[in-house]
Amino acid sequence: MNTRLERLQARLSDTQAVLIKAPYHLGYLTGFPSEDSFLLVTRDAGYFLTDFRYIELAQQRVHGVKCVMLKRLTETLTELATQHGIDTLYVETGRCTVRFCEQLRKGLPMLTVADTDEADRWLSDMRMVKEAGEIAKIEQAQAIAEEALAHVLPMIRPGVSERDIALELEFYMRKHGAQRAAFDCIVVSGANSSLPHGIPTDKPIERGDFVTMDFGAVVDGYLSDMTRTVAVGEVSDDQRLVYETVLRAQQAALSVLKEGLPCKDGDAAARRVIEQAGFHECFGHATGHGVGVQIHEEPRLSGGSDQVLQCGNVVTVEPGIYLQGRFGVRIEDMVVITEDGCRNLTHAPKDLLIV
Ligand SMILES: [Mn+2]
C-alpha cells in the first residue's frame, strides 16, 4: 500500500488530477526521484510518466503506480485525462515555469490547468510531518555530517583555505555514504564569517579567526543541516561574548520547542536573548526551518510564521550574530518535535572550541 499517494488522492474529487514533476516529490510519492519525469495522480489511479532514458530504472524503482513510456507529454495526458474524466489539473506552481504551464494549457485545451497553490500546499502539509522511517534517514545523514566535521577539525589551522575545508567536508561525506552534499558547503572565516551564507574562498585561515561551517549530507533523498563555529588559536573577549550569546539563544529556543507551540514563539525565544544582549540588527534571518527532502521546507521558525509546531516536524534551530567586517557566529542543530519537547538529532559538541 502506498499511503502517501493515497493521502494525496484523498484531497482530490473524481474530476481532479495533480501533475507532479519535482524530483523530490516523485521520490517522496513513488520512491524514484527522477529528472524529466512526471507523476499523474487522479482520485483512484497514479501513473509514472517517463521516457526511454529512465523507463527501465523506473520499472525497477517506482512503487504503487504504473509506469508509462512517454513520447509527448500532452498526448499522454490527454489520453489519461479522457480515460478518467478529468477536467481540472493541478500543478506544482511553486516549481513549474511559466513556459511549462503555457505548454500544458495549449496542449490540453479541454482541461483547466489550475495556477493556484493547492498542489504545493497538499504536498508541503504531508511532508512537514515526518514518519519514523524518514527521521531515521535524516539521522543517518546527520551522522555522516558529524563524522565529516570530526574529520576536518584537525585540519583547521592557519594557512589552510576555506575552500580546502569545504571540499574536504564534501569529499568525506560522499566517501562515507552520502549521495551528495545537501547544498554547497559553507565555510567562512575571519571577517568572511559575518556573511551568513558566504561562499568559501581561497582565503587562508588565520590565528584569531572564527570559522563557521554550515553543511549537510543526503541519505536516500533525505537531507541534514548543521552549523558549527570554532575559533582558531585564540579568542578575544568580544568573540567569546558573541559565541556565548548565540549558544544561550539557541538553548532558549530548544527549551521551548514542542508540539502546539506557535513557530513565531520559537523564533522569539532565541531573538529575545540576542536582543537583550545588545545585538539588535545583528540576527537578520529566521531562527530555523523544516528539513526533509528539501533543505528549506515547512514549518519556518520565523517571526512572520502563523504555523504551529506538530509532532514529527523536523526543524533546525540556528540563531546567529553577524558583526559586519569583523566576525560572525552561528550554531545550528536539527531537532524533531515531540509531545513534550524536542529530540535533538545533532550530537556534535557546542561549547566554544579553540582549535
Ligand atoms: Mn539551516
Image: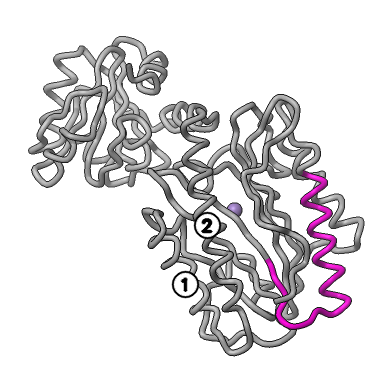
**Residue at x-position 41% and y-position 68%:** 171
Whichever of callouts 2 and 1 sits on the residue coming sooner in the sequence is: 2
Marks 1 and 2: in contact by CB < 8 Å? no
Left/right placement of residue 14 relative to residue 257 reads left
Verify whether residue 101 appears in magenta. no
Q: Quadrant of the N terminus?
A: top left
**Residue at x-position 70% and y-position 77%:** 355
Indicate the amino acid at tag 1: Glu
The one nearer the camera, 18 or 320, is 320
- The x and y percentages for residue 117 are 45, 32
**Residue at x-position 52% and y-position 63%:** 148
Disc 2 crowd rating (10 Å Cα; few below 14, some 14-19, many 20+) is many
- The x and y percentages for residue 7 are 41, 18
Left/right placement of residue 193 relative to residue 110 reads right
Answer with the quarter of the image where residue 238 lies: bottom right
Verify whether residue 238 appears in magenta. yes
Element carrying mark 2: helix
Q: Which residue corresponds to mark 2? A: 145
Answer with the quarter of the image where residue 167 lies: bottom left
**Residue at x-position 13% and y-position 30%:** 68
Indicate the amino acid at tag 2: Ala
Q: Residue furthest top?
A: 14
Disc 1 crowd rating (10 Å Cα; few below 14, some 14-19, many 20+) is some
Dominant secondary structure (helix, strand or loop) of the stretch shown in magenta: helix
Left/right placement of residue 224 relative to residue 328 reads left
Exactly how many numbered labels are in the figure?
A: 2
Task: Please tell me whether residue 3 is drawn above or below residue 261 in the rendered image.
Answer: above
Q: Which residue corresponds to mark 1? A: 168
Chain part drawn in magenta: 229-253
